[in-house]
Amino acid sequence: MNKTHFTKHLGGACLSLMMLASTSCKVKKEEPKSPVQKPNILVIFADDLGYGDVSCNGSKSIKTPNMDQLANEGIRFTSGYATSATCTPARYSMLTGAYPWKNKRAEILAGDAPLLIDTTWTTLPKMLQQQGYHTSVIGKWHLGLGDGSVNWNKEVTPGPRAVGFNDEYIMAATNDRVPCVFINNGHVDHLDPNDPIEVNYKNNFPGEPTGKANPEMLKMKTTQGHNQSIVNGISRIGYMKGGKSALWKDEDMADLFLDKTKKYITNHKDEPFFLYYALHEPHVPRIPHPRFVGKSGMGPRGDAILEADWCVGEIMKHLKSLGLDDNTIVIFSSDNGPVTDDGYADQADELLGDHKPLGPLRGGKYSLLDGGTRVPFFIRWTNHIKPGTSNALVTQMDFLASFAHMLGVKDIDLKDSKNTLDAFLGKDKVGRKEFVFEAINHKTGLRQGDYILIPPHKGGKYIDWGVMNETGNSEEYQLYNIKEDIGQAKNLAEDKPELLKKMTKRYEELTKGYKWKSNFKPVL
């Protein structure tokens, strides 16, 4: 371990670092010596939360006081990015430090897809585990489980524990897909062995109702797709039968994950921990607890955002009650940009009013435009990060390299992850010089400094299965200065031919050999 780097980046807290520091410092005799406590790392990941969905980023219609407090007590990044405009690739990238567009399989996964992450790779949790951290994931996973032929009635492996997590409490995939059960360290939680689970993504099981055939059974109608097996009065993508005692109730999901998270923190308060707390809000189907229903005035989507904000506040209060808030790096972000109508008739569009989930951005979930990948992004570390706002270009993909550097870790394969620790700590106002972002179907573009290049891509202007988000597709090159034109209203491709040529050359260098034809097709 590089002691100098460790001491420097942990802020020179003299007493707590005295056993690692290479220099000495004076301490009062009456103060007992204490062992070094590496900072805990808590990543809170929202699902489909837009840049403009939080009030600290300008929302006037919905208030997110707990997310705002995190931002106000740390750094609020105005150019914080997920690497992909869809969830599975973005989560894959955050945990592996690898660009998702380099992996042909890194697409929106079915609920029975095999584990996406290579178990031989160094991942963020694996690196931290090797440095003495206890690691856990609680909440949404959606990175595949098993080897492609999972028997849900036995141990489900490989999974999170194979890629660096000590334990897991996760939904099997995501909340709009079957199987609608939770996985507790490799086993379906509360499963009755006399009522085995069966899952099929092609054919229904005889006699099992579906949203398409039995709409009278639904408490929330669908707008496109999501009309297969019915669980808790909501039809999902995919077919399943059995496992009645293990099926989740959407209304209780947030409370369950929150309770699991609090218990995990309590149980590991005396050792450094890395916790990936993956919220399911405001992903569809949006079914918040009755405590939040009607509170936003914007229907289920707004209510789900309030529920997520409450969860953030409860976790921060819990950290403080245990005396851990000062020594915990808390990161809050989202896996991709926002979407309103994403398959369920929950009036997300009709009840928006003046609210703009994208804020000043353009695009949204699935899109090449900036709103697909630029997301809420805050980091708080009391006494180590000076509160403020940063325009530095930062990405979730760089957690691996940055925390490895902080801990003095060397000689590991960082894939595409870069050390931007100084930007995360507010000491560097630039951050990354460039990165390649991804939209659905492996379509990519390049951000370099203040400019975004989107090369020509085939396809329509809007997502073609009913979502009204712009794709960003065009037969022409697109070039935007997002410092001067954050809404990407003016295409500068003709005005700046030399810059266009330079960025196009660099884009081709970075993406050479990685232009896949996507196999993704939405289930309708």
Image (spheres, rainbow, N blue to C red):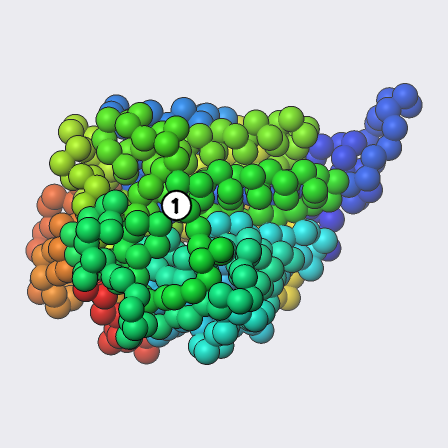
Res 348 quadrant in image: top left
Q: Is residue 316 above or below residue 278?
A: above
Q: Is residue 126 above or below residue 38?
A: below
Q: Is residue 405 above or below residue 516?
A: above
Image quarter in which the C terminus is found: bottom left
Structural crowding at the residue carrying mark 1, measured as other residues with C-alpha within 10 Å and reported as few (<14), some (14–19) or many (≥20): many
On the question of residue 375 being in view, the answer is: no
Residue nearest the viewer, comparing 337 with 393:
337
Q: How many marks?
A: 1
Identity of the residue drawn at 71% across and 32% down: 13
Identity of the residue drawn at 39% across and 40% down: 251
Res 242 quadrant in image: bottom left
Residue 168 left/right relative to 299: right
Q: Would you name the residue on which mark 1 appears?
A: 250
On the question of residue 299 being in view, the answer is: yes
Residue nearest the viewer, comparing 107 with 78:
107
Image quarter in which the N terminus is found: bottom right
Q: Residue 420 at x, y = what percent?
A: 49, 49
Q: Secondary structure at mark 1?
A: helix
Residue 93 left/right relative to 157: left
Residue nearest the viewer, comparing 175 with 29:
175
Spot the residue most to the right.
Answer: 29
Q: Residue 395 at x, y = what percent?
A: 41, 50
Identity of the residue drawn at 13% across and 50% down: 468
Q: Residue 86 at x, y = what percent?
A: 31, 57
The amino acid pointed to by label 1 is Asp
Identity of the residue drawn at 77% across and 41% down: 36
Q: Residue 192 at x, y = what percent?
A: 54, 61
